[in-house]
Image (spheres, helix red, strand yellow):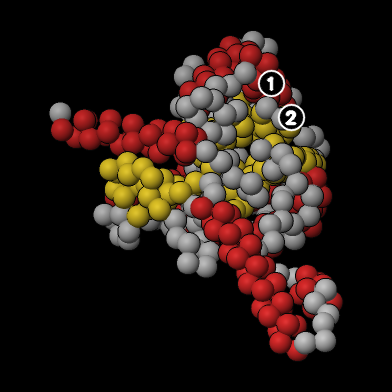
Amino acid sequence: MRVVWGAATHVGMLRQSNEDAFAAQDDVFVVADGMGGHNAGEIASALAVKGMRDAAVAGFASAESVVAAINAANIVIHTASGGPTDQRGMGTTLTAVVPLAATADEPQRMVVANVGDSRVYLWRGGELKQVSADHSYVQELLSEGFINAAEARVHPRRNIVTRALGIEGDVSADSWTLPMIVGDRYVLCSDGLVDEVQDEQIAAILRQSTSAQHTAESLVTAANANGGRDNVTVVVVDVADETAPTVLADSPSADSLDGGRLTSRTSSRVRRVLVAVAVAGAIFSVGVAAAGWYARGGYFVGFDGSGDDATLVVFKGRPRRILWFSPTVRIDSGVTRAEVFPALAADIDDRPEYESLKRARAYVESIRGVVEAQRDEAGS
């Protein structure tokens, strides 16, 4: 799999300068929204992006390495904020998406990390999900049930963040590791987008399935059309297949049937019928064989059963039944749905597919490792 991306940024309709910064390259995608007044916010966001780009040169191997790069950038910004007077107290949000290459033990994955209220959305299967968690005062009120989502959108303190790079010597970044699935679309954005464009409108723009670059530009345009009261930056990352998809025919075409009749000319009506039956039977057999080969090819991860007691397994076959061919369980992890983090369980419900049993096993074993650690902690 490979990534295809597009990016757009704009100062907005009211601001005089753009304190957002972004990186968009094959190995790292970042959006940072600076704060601090004068040029300080612009400096903080630029330092954050530079830190992530520098770390990408050495390469990212895990979510921990992405978080380590964020921590390193925080130290640089915090140190710089103790310099010139106009840089004191400067900070920046940061949200990042980093593709991880496949290894002997792990399939291709996508790491999402964030500090502050810049967001990462995932568009998968026609649904929009917010992957990142806002570190903001309003999000805390929303999580504790003091306000609802509609009130959060217009709350006068909605731009107060509870975490940011550069404010303290240490920072706590959240991170998530998701399977890479062809067709996924990630949207990284500063709050200049989400403050102006509701999730329903974002989904409507993504549903148009235009190129990543055109989608990024359309989202920025929508933010400015709705008021553009802040800088707005959007990076769109699409997960694409390395090669063009192969179309597998599993049923006879009209042309092949016509050809069969044309090659069976004879003066005997009975012979024509027998030849037609033989040709139809051969085509049907080939079609069934092809369908069976396709139905049994590949592997996918999912839950076997329903409810909290459903177990995490690796299936051989396709997620959807083809003819009478059903997927079969190859590996039972012993992990139940109740033991899996809800957001990850929702991703597993999408039944991610893998080319080999080795990669599917690696994904399941990584989840089992986390669950077993939780079991040990609970038992101690």
| Residue placed most toward the observer, 290 or 156 | 290
Q: Element type at marker 1? A: helix
Q: Element type at marker 2? A: strand
Q: Which mark is residue 25?
A: 2
The location of residue 58, given as percent across then percent down, is 63, 14
Mark 2 or mark 1: which is in front?
2
Quadrant location, the N terminus: top right
> Which residue is at 66% across, 28% downward?
28
Residue 370 picture quarter: top left
Residue, disc 1? 53
Q: Are marks 2 and 1 in contact (CB under 8 Å)?
A: yes
Q: Amino acid at mark 1?
A: Arg
| Residue placed most toward the observer, 32 or 259 | 259
> Which residue is at 82% across, 87% downward?
267
Q: Is residue 253 above or below residue 146?
A: below
The location of residue 284, given as percent across then percent down, is 63, 69
Instruction: Mark 1: give few (<14), some (14-19) or many (20+) Cα within 10 Å.
Output: many
Q: Amino acid at mark 2?
A: Gln
Quadrant location, the C terminus: top left
